[in-house]
Amino acid sequence: MLTEQQKALWEQLRHTLSRDQAIWFAGYVQGIVQPEGMAATATVTAQKKLRVFFATETGNSKMVAQQVAKQAKDHGWNASPQSVKKIKQAEELQSDEPIIFITATHGEGEPPETALAFFEMLQQSDVSLKGVKYAVLGLGDSSYPQYNQAARDLDAYMEKLGAERIYERGELDVDFASHYPQWIAGVLSALPSAQLASVLPVTIETAMPAGKGYSRLEPIVGRVREMINLNDRGSAKETYHIEIEHDEPLAYAPGDVAGIILPHFAEGVDHLTPRLYSIASSPLAHAGSIHLTVALAWHQDEDGEIGYGLCSRYLADLKVGDEVKFFIQRNSLFKLPEDERDIIMIGPGTGIAPFRSFVWERAERGASGRNWLFFGEQHQHCDFLYQAEWIDFVETGVLHKIDLAFSRDQEHKVYVQHCLKEKASELLKWVDGGAAIYVCGAKDPMSKDVEQTLLEIFATQKGGSEAAQEFLDQLHDDNRYVKDVY
Ligand SMILES: Cc1cc2nc3c(=O)[nH]c(=O)nc-3n(C[C@H](O)[C@H](O)[C@H](O)COP(=O)(O)OP(=O)(O)OC[C@H]3O[C@@H](n4cnc5c(N)ncnc54)[C@H](O)[C@@H]3O)c2cc1C
Ligand SMILES: Cc1cc2nc3c(=O)[nH]c(=O)nc-3n(C[C@H](O)[C@H](O)[C@H](O)COP(=O)(O)O)c2cc1C
C-alpha cells in the first residue's frame, strides 16, 4: 500500500513515537479518513465501551481479561473486566458494545464453578442476540479429553442466539502465557476502529512465570526426601506427607499447587493428565523442597476387589531418594491477604494442605493478622493430620483458634460445618472485622455444606437468605471468600 519512500519515512517516525504520540497519531489518521461532515479528531481517548467478561477458577482467565482491558484502553476502548457471574439474564448481553469472553474449562469439560449458572442460563435462553459482536478466548489443558470445552460451548451458545463472532475463537493450552498476547492483538484489530494494532506493538507483561518448572510441558525432576504416613494405627485412611527436594530455583506462593507427572506405567496409556496437589509447605519456611499431603484414593470394583487411584498409589509407594517429575501451577485467587488481615481457614481432610503452607508462611513473616483453623477427619487419635505442628502453633500464638470436627468419635456425625454453626457469633465478628474465609478440600459435599452453613449464619445477621447471598457474593468479589475444592 505504501511506496518505498513512505515506508522508509514511516519506519523513521514510528521508532520515535511515544505511546501517547502514537495514540494521538492514530486518532489523527482516523480523523483524516472519516467521512465528510464528521469532525476530524486528533486524539483518541478511551471513549468507546468494550465489555470484557471472564469465567475463572484459579485466576488465569481473570488475569488475561485484565490484560485485554489494559491493551484495549491503548486502542481507545474503555473496559473493566467482570465475572460472567454478574450476568443474570441473556438480555443483559444485548448491546452494541462488543463483548470479549475469556473462559477456562474445569472438571470434566465444564465451565468454572462460578460460571455454571451463567452457562446454564445462556444455554436455555431463546433471546435474540442479533447484532451483538463477540469473541471467545478459552484457556485449557490439552491433556484433558474435553479440551477447552467451556469456550467451545460458550461460542456455540452465542452463535445460536444470533450473535456475530468478530474474531475466531482462541483455544490456549497450559503455555497460554506465551500465546495470549497474540490473540489479544488479533481481536483488538478486529474491533471496528482499532487501527492502532499495527502502530503500537503489543507489549504485555505476563504475570505468569513461563519456563522450566511452571507447566507440564517443562517439569523439573525432584527427589523424595521424606515420606510419612500421617495416619496412625486404627485409621481407615492413608494420608502421606511427602517432601520433594529440588535443586533448581522454584518460585511459588502459599496456595499454589504442584502438578505431578505420572510415569508411563499404565499399559496402553501414553498421555496421562498430571494430578494436582496443594502445596503444603511455605517457600519461606521450607526453602529447597515442596511438601504435599496426599490421600491414597481407593475404590471397590464390580468384583468387590480393592483398586487404587493411579497417582495417589504411585506417590504413596515412593521411597526416600526416588525421583519425581513435577511443576508448579499458580493459583492466583487462593492467596494469603495482607499480613494484617485475619483469616478463617476451613480445610478438612487433605484440605488442610494449603493451610499448613499459609500458617508456616505467616509465622515466618510475623504477620499480625489472626489465624483460625477448622479441621475435620474421622478420628482424633489417628487422623489428626499434622497434630503436633498445630499444637505448637497454638502454643506459640501463631494459630489463634482451632476447631476440630472428628466425625466418628461420637454417636452423631460431626463435620466442620457444625463447628462453624456453633461458633457463628464469633465468626460473624471476625468477618465484620474484615476476615477472609478460605475453603479447601472435597467439593462435594463438604464445600457445598460449608457454603450453605455460611449462608445460614449470614442470614441471621443480614436479615434473610437473599441478603446473605448478596453478602457472600460481595465477599467473593472482594477475594474474602475463596475456595480451592476438588
Ligand atoms: C486443585 C487441586 C488440588 C488438589 N489437592 C490435593 C491434595 O492436596 N491432596 C490430595 O490427596 N488430593 C488433592 N487433589 C486431588 C488429586 O489431584 C487427585 O485427583 C487424587 O489424588 C486422585 O488421583 P488418582 O490418580 O490417585 O486417582 P484416579 O486414578 O484419577 O482415580 C480417581 C478416583 O476414581 C477411583 N477409581 C478409579 N478407577 C475406578 C473404577 N474402575 N471404579 C471405581 N472407581 C475408580 C479412584 O479410586 C479414585 O478415587 C487435588 C485436586 C485439585 C484439582
Ligand atoms: C481440576 C481441573 C480440571 C480441568 N479440566 C479441564 C478440561 O476438562 N479441559 C481443559 O481444556 N482444561 C481443563 N483444565 C485446565 C484449566 O482450564 C487451565 O488450567 C486454565 O488455565 C485454568 O484457568 P483459570 O485459572 O482461569 O481457572 C482443568 C484444570 C483443573 C485444575
Image: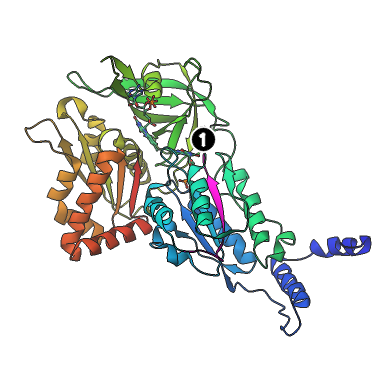
Quadrant where the image shows the N terminus: bottom right
Per the image, the residue denoted by label 1 is 250
Identity of the residue drawn at 62% across and 45% down: 179
Residue 324 percent coordinates (x, y): 48, 22
Residue 134: in magenta span: yes
* Residue 28 appears left or right of 350: right
The quarter of the image holding the C terminus is top left
Give the magenta part as a residue range. 128-144
Seen in the picture, residue 180 relative to 10 is either above or below; the reply is above
Of residues 258 and 97, which is closer to you in this image? 97
Name the secondary structure under disc 1.
Answer: loop
Kind of residue sitting beneath label 1: Leu
- Residue name at image x 51 percent, y 17 percent: 268
- Number of numbered discs overlaid on the protein picture: 1
Visible in this render: residue 203? no
Mark 1, Cα crowd under 10 Å, few <14 / some 14-19 / many 20+, is some
The location of residue 401, given as percent across then percent down, is 20, 45
* Residue 462 visible within the image: yes
Tell me the residue at 25%/57% (across/down). Answer: 431
Residue 162 percent coordinates (x, y): 53, 60
Question: In the image, residue 237 lies at what x, y percent?
Answer: 24, 23
- Residue 79, magenta (yes or no): no
Looking at this view, is 188 or 237 the one in front?
A: 188
